[in-house]
Amino acid sequence: MIEKQTASHYIWGNGCDGWCLLTADTLSIIEERIPPGGSEIRHHHQIARQFFYVLAGILSFEINGKEIDLTPRQGIEIAPSVSHRVFNRFSHDAEFLVISSPPSHDDRIVDEES
């Protein structure tokens, strides 16, 4: 059984949290939390395909320069080589799953800020 309370925890960005629920050679599943005002830097992955699924709050995305908001029970796929970042411009935590195939941590390329 896998549960958030016993999963490996890490901190990223400005006060954001991640819990590694599954890490395998070809797949990773991570639960993440972004507090109000939190964000990550714009980046892309050369190989990894990702799927983000919102559990709570509103999660904002910048994808190839366009912004969209996802609410609970909505998800979006990010294909390899697509520039993206997630952020929280709302007043409550955004909680979501990030599913990557293969795992994306060693496949992250920071994009220049425009």
Image: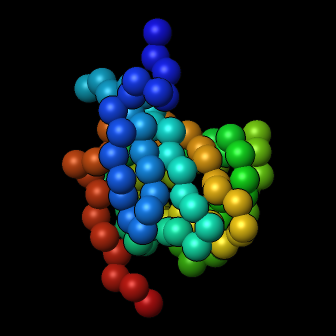
- State which quarter of the image contains the C terminus: bottom left
Q: How did the renderer colour the structure?
A: rainbow
Say which residue appears at 45% left-offset and 32% top-offset: 29
Residue at 68% x, 41% y: name it.
Answer: 55
Residue 49 shows in the view: no
The percent position of residue 83, horizontal first and vertical second, equals 45, 67
Residue placed farthest to the front in the image? 5
Residue 66 in the image: above or below residue 108: below
Judged left or right of residue 57, residue 30 is left
Judge from the rendering whether residue 18 lies leftward or rightward of residue 89; answer left or right. Answer: left
**Residue that protrudes farthest toward the top in the picture:** 1
Q: Where is residue 112 in the image (x, y as percent from the top left)?
A: 34, 82
Q: Is residue 21 left or right of residue 65?
A: left
Residue 5 picture location, percent across and down: 47, 27
Corner quadrant of residue 9:
top left
**Residue 42 seen from this side:** yes
Question: Front-most of 62 and 89?
Answer: 89
Q: Please indicate whether residue 42 sits to the left or right of residue 110 in the image.
A: right
- Residue occupying the point 33% across, 46% down: 10
View extreme (bottom): residue: 114
Which residue is at a point 76% across and 39% down the rendered structure image? 73
Q: In this view, does 113 lie above or below 67?
A: below
Which quadrant of the figure has residue 100?
Answer: top left
Residue 75 location, x and y as percent?
Answer: 67, 45
Give 59 or 1, whichever is nearer the viewer: 1
